[in-house]
Amino acid sequence: MVNDEVVVTPWEVKGDIDYDKLVRDFGTQKIGDEIISKIEQIAGEVHPLIKRKIFFSHRDLDWLLSEYEKGNKFFLYTGRGPSGDTHLGHLVSWILTKWFQDKFGAELWFQMTDDEKFYFKDGLTAEFTNRMAYENALDVIALGFDEKKTFIFSDFDYAKTLYPQAAKVAKKLTFSTARAVFGFNESSNVGQIFFTSMQSVPAFLPSIKEGKNIPCLIPHAIDQDPHFRVCRDILPKLGYYKPAAIHSMFLPGLKQGGKMSSSIMDSAIFTTDTGEQIEKKVKNAFTGGKSTAEEQRKTGANPDICSVYNYYFILFMWDDNELGDLRKRCLCGEILCGDCKKILENKIKKFLNDHQKKREEAKKRLDKFILRD
Ligand code: TYM
C-alpha cells in the first residue's frame, strides 16, 4: 500500500509536499515577482535561494522591507534544535540569513533550543542537547557571520534572560490553543506544551534590550511556521511588532520523499561527514533514472523527481546556465545517473572540506558569539 499522507509540523515532515497547498493551509503569502524586485532594488541583487523560489513563502516581508526603506532597520532571528549534528538542510536558512546580514547590515539572534530537543526527543539527555548546541554553533560561525552582529545562545544557558520573557508569552497562551496548533494530548509532557513560549522570545528580545520596537525577520523552513503563528498572535498583545518571516522548502533526503532528516541516517549528509560517507550516500541516492542505461540513453531521465537534481537546484548549482544545461542533458539521456552523482559528490566534498576547516577555526572564536547569563 502506498502511504501518501503528508505531514508538516515542527517535529515531523513526511510525504509528497504540495507547497502551494501549504501556503493556502497555513495562510502565508507566496513569494512573488513583485517582492523579489523590491529585494533586488534594495539589496542590489537577489540571492538564488529567493530567485529560484526555494524561499517560496513569507509573512509580512513586504511590510518589513517598506519599514527598512523608511529607515526602520530590522534584526534577523533564526535557530536550531540541537538534537545531533548539523545537516545540509539546516544550512539552507542559515545561508540566506547570512546574505541578509551582509546586504542589510542586520544583527542576527540565533537560538539553540536545547530544551526543546530534550522535551521532544525520547532518549536525549539535557546534557547531550546542551553540548550539541555548541557543536551546531560551530556550523553557524563557519558560514561567516559577523562576530560583532551575531548572538548565539542556548535556552538552558541564557535562561535568566529568556525565562521571564517566555513567562509573559506563556500567560497569553492557553492549553487549548497550543493543543489545536501542535496536536498535544493528555500524555504530552508539560515542557512540550510550554516550549513554544521560549521560541517566541528572540522575536522581541532585541526590542526589550533597545527599549524600542524593532522589526524582526525570521528565515526558516516552513515546518517552523506553527510556532510563529502563535508568536504573531501574542506579540502585539505584549506591545511588540509581529515578526516577519521568509519560508523555505525542504532540502529532500537523498532517499525519495520528505525532508532531509537526521533520524534517517543514510538520507542526510552531515557537515561532519567524511569523504567516504559522502561518496556512499550520494551513490545510494534516489534518482529519476531508468532501470537500464540503454533505456535511459534512449528515453532520458526525469530530473523533477530526482533528489540529486534537487541538490543542484537548491544548493550546489546556482548558475542558471549550468543547471539548464545539465537538465537538458538529463532529459535527453546524454548524461547518466552515475556520472551526474559523481559531479554532485565532488561538489559536496569540496564544500564540506572547506566548511570543516572553517568549523575548526570557529572553535577558537566560539566565545565571541555566545551569550550566557
Ligand atoms: P531544526 O533544528 O529542526 O531546524 C533548523 C532549521 O533548519 C530548517 N530545516 C530545514 N530546511 C531545509 N531543508 C531541510 N531538510 C530542513 N530541516 C530543517 C528548519 O526549518 C529550521 O529553520 N525549533 C527549531 C529551532 C528554532 C528555530 C527558531 C528555527 C528556534 N528558534 C527560529 C527557525 C527559526 C528547530 O528545531 O529547528
Image (tube, grey):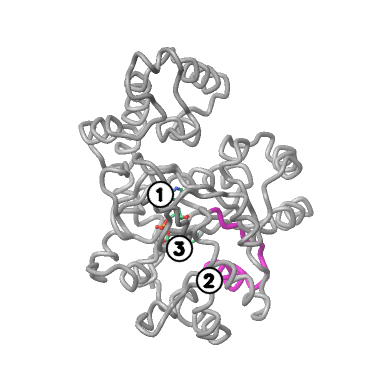
Label 3: state its secondary structure.
loop
Q: Amino acid at mark 2?
A: Ser
Position of residue 255 measured from the top left corner of the image (x, y, whole percent)? 34, 41
Marks 3 and 1, how far apart at CA: 20 Å
Numbered mark located on residue 10 in the image: 3
What is the C-alpha distance between the residues marked 2 and 3? Answer: 14 Å
Magenta stretch contains residue 300: no
Q: Earlier in the sequence, mark 3 or mark 1?
A: 3
How packed is label 1: few (under 14 Cα within 10 Å), some, or many (20 or more)?
many
Mark 2, residue position = 200
Above or below, 102 relative to 323? below
* Earlier sequence position, callout 2 versus callout 3: 3
Label 1: which secondary element:
helix
What SS does tag 2 mark?
helix
Identity, as a three-letter code, of the amino acid under mark 3? Pro
Quarter, ligand 1: bottom left
Q: Which residues are magenta?
A: 200-219
Q: How many marks?
A: 3
Q: Residue at x 38, y 61 (%)?
A: 81
The answer as to whether callout 3 falls within 8 Å of ligand 1 is yes
Residue depth check, mark 3 versus mark 1: number of the one nearer the observer = 3
Q: Which residue is mark 1?
A: 140
Q: CA distance from mark 2 to mark 1?
A: 20 Å
Viewer-nearest of labels 2 and 1?
A: 2
Q: Earlier in the sequence, mark 2 or mark 1?
A: 1
Q: Choose between 136 and 75: the one closer to the eye.
A: 136
